[in-house]
Amino acid sequence: MEQVPEFFEKLFSTASWPARWYCGDWTEFHGWLYIISDLAIWAAYFVIPIFLIRFIKKKPNIPLPNVFWLFGAFILFCGLTHLIDATIFWWPAYRLSALVRFMTAVISWITIFAIYRFFPVALALKTPADFEKEILERKKSESKFMGLLESAPDAMVIADSVGKIQMVNAQTEWIFGYKRDEIIGKEVEILIPERFHNKHTEYRHGYVEHPKVRGMGVGMELFGKRKDGSEFPVEISLSPMKLVGEAGILVISAVRDITKQKEDEEQIIKLNENLEQLIIERTSELELSLKKEKAARIEMNKNQLRLTFLTEASKVLISSLDYSKTLENLANMITPDIADWCVIDELTEIGTIKRIVTSHVDPNKIKLANELEQKYPNATNGLYEVIHNRKSQFYHDISEELLESLAYNQEHLRLMNDLGIRSAIIVPLLSRDKIYGVMTLGLSDSVRLFDENDFEFTKELARRTSFAIENAKLYKELQVTNAELELRVAQRTTELEAINKELEAFSYSVSHDLRAPLRSIDGFSNKILKDYNNLFDDQGKDYFNRVMNASRHMGHLIDDLIKLARISRIDMNSAEINLSAMAQSIISELKESNPERKANIYIQDDMIITGDRNLMHVALHNLLGNAWKYSKNKPETEIEFATIQNDKQIGAGFDMRYIDKLFGAFQRLHSHSEFEGTGIGLATVQRIFRRHHGTIWAESEVNKGTTFFFTL
């Protein structure tokens, strides 16, 4: 290592060696051939790096540039060794030659290591065939790109970094009205209204400096300009595209005509405005409806309270017939629930007004009202007006002016102001066109005022109060009338008892005094016919027979009349009666009396009632006997007895024009020669059913039959 410093100190020293011409046996030819060959090699090695350097400069993106630089240095140093070898023939700088050779060796191995290191990369370098294939694929991609570009629904404008239009699609031609060759190479501002050019240039430069995918003019209104100068609203999306081997970028602008969208938006805005207006109107309507509904609910609650109050008031009004006490209770109910004031005045028989009750929540106000009435009795003229006109009066809001018009003087006005009445209702107590007085309700200490519903409520309350007063007065009148009626009934009862005694005496007289002459007439007539039969011709005999029949008929009449009188006087003994069994027994008797009669009899089973057995037997015997009697001329008798109406009608029937005579005593709808009888039977039946608190009626049609109906 001690020789190294000495080596570099004597690097250019030639004192230790002779020139190569003097070493060995060099001929001219041999020496110059060696020198010229080294110089030629050095020149070639010198020129090759120059070409490599120029190649690298021309191809800045050439792959593995460091390898090219090392390879150029290696060739250059190799050339230096040959140059030094040529100069050694005259300048024996063997130390410099050794250093250059050492550096050449170092650079050679560095180059070898670099080539080794980048050998895989070198193997991956594309061949011309690869480049041709890549170019073909790129052309296909470009073709696809152009297809997509042409099929895009928006106008696609591709410009370089300085704003020159490089490519457009068919949609751009259609939207903007330009041919491609008219705008390619032109600045993109050709498609923008002039008023936006300056700002757009600034925005374009800013985008090139910071390219990214985004919308253009976010939040701004953008417009495009057609070839004819017309403008239209647009939306623009920007996308940067980096080109391989290019320093700049391409800007892809997707331009969409939003004229229809803007029109739709304006329409939507108008619709929204209309909708907002409708919403506002509807909201107002709903608010109004809610207010009305709230008011209706409040009024409904008030009406419910009023109805409840009327119900309770009605109970109070019917609780006593002392209407003075009743009205006092009613007034105490009205205050303070309905009004602050309640005054009820009665119209007397002589036409004056009498105060029945005064009620107020504040007793001091009652004293004040009494003082006002005593000092100014003529102030009740308004009540007389209501009584005279029979019309209610409603003062919704009593103003100071109204009070001044009613006041007789300042003192009167002061007293009315002290009462503090702010709202009042005055209604007449009227029932069946008769007026009984006046009811007055007032509000003073309350913050509210009477309304129309209160007015109607007060009139209804007054109507019920009028009925209560009327009923009380009628009750008093009825008490007097009842006393008079009881006296008259007692007198009439005495008279009826006397009449009944006379009737009983008459019945006795008929049964005893009249029967004897009738028996004598019948007996002597019969004896004359027997004893002196030969003395009379047929006409004489007929006369005597008629006398006997008439006397016998009169006897039957007397018997039936006595029975009819007894029906009303006989005591009733109520018991359970089986009408079905009783009817069967009566029908059996009738059949035994006329066994030759054809009869269809239907009697419903177990018809049970409560009544007098003897009287009901008389009634059924008369009804069934009449049915049997009046159907004797029919080929076949049909009789039904049941608790339901039946369509079948039985008997001879009668004209319904004579229905009023059917149940009268001695009233007959058929002649005695056609059907025997006295005409007392149905009158007797009617009295029996009346005594059982029932009724009887009939429906009939001549020659078809009759149906009798009765209730008990």
Image: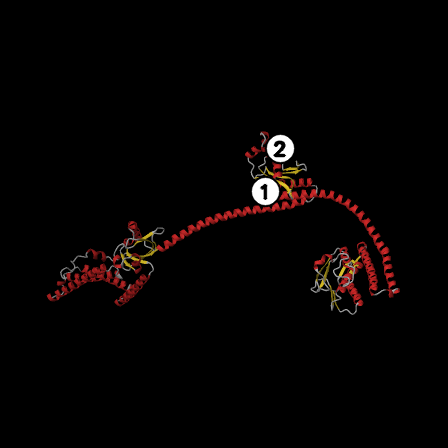
Front residue of 192/4: it is: 192
From the viewer's perspective, is residue 375 above or below residue 269?
Answer: above
Q: Secondary structure at mark 2?
A: helix
Query: Is 539 on the left or on the right of 334, as rendered?
Result: right
* Residue under the point 13% across and 63% down: 21
Give the side of residue 205 with respect to residue 694, left or right. Answer: left
Mark 2 is surrounded, within 10 Å at the Cα level, by few (under 14), some (14 to 19) or many (20 or more) other residues, namely few
Which image quarter holds the N terminus?
bottom left
Q: Quadrant of residue 175?
A: bottom left
As rendered, which of 575 and 342 lies closer to the eye?
Answer: 575
Question: Element under label 1?
Answer: helix
Does the CB distance between marks 2 and 1 fall below 8 Å? no
- Residue at horizontal 82 percent and vertical 52 percent from the top: 503
Q: Does residue 320 show up?
A: no
Q: Is residue 210 placed above or below 426 in the rendered structure?
A: below
Q: Measuring from the top left, give residue 66's x and y in whole percent.
A: 26, 60
Q: Which residue is mark 2?
A: 378
Q: Quadrant of residue 652?
A: bottom right
Q: Would residue 230 be found to the left or right of residue 564 on screen?
A: left
Residue at the limit of the structure toward the top, as seen here: 410
Q: Report which residue position mark 1 lands on.
A: 455
- Three-letter code, disc 1: Phe
The tag on residue 22 is none
Task: Tell me the quadrant of the picture where the C terminus can be found.
Answer: bottom right
Q: Amino acid at mark 2?
A: Asn
Question: Where is residue 488, by image quadrant?
Answer: top right
Residue at mark 2 to residue at mark 1: CA–CA distance: 26 Å
- Pointer 1 local density, CA inside 10 Å: few below 14, some 14–19, many at least 20: many
Give how far across and how far down residue 59 sits, in percent. Answer: 24, 60
Query: Which mark's residue is nearer the viewer, 2 or 1?
Result: 2
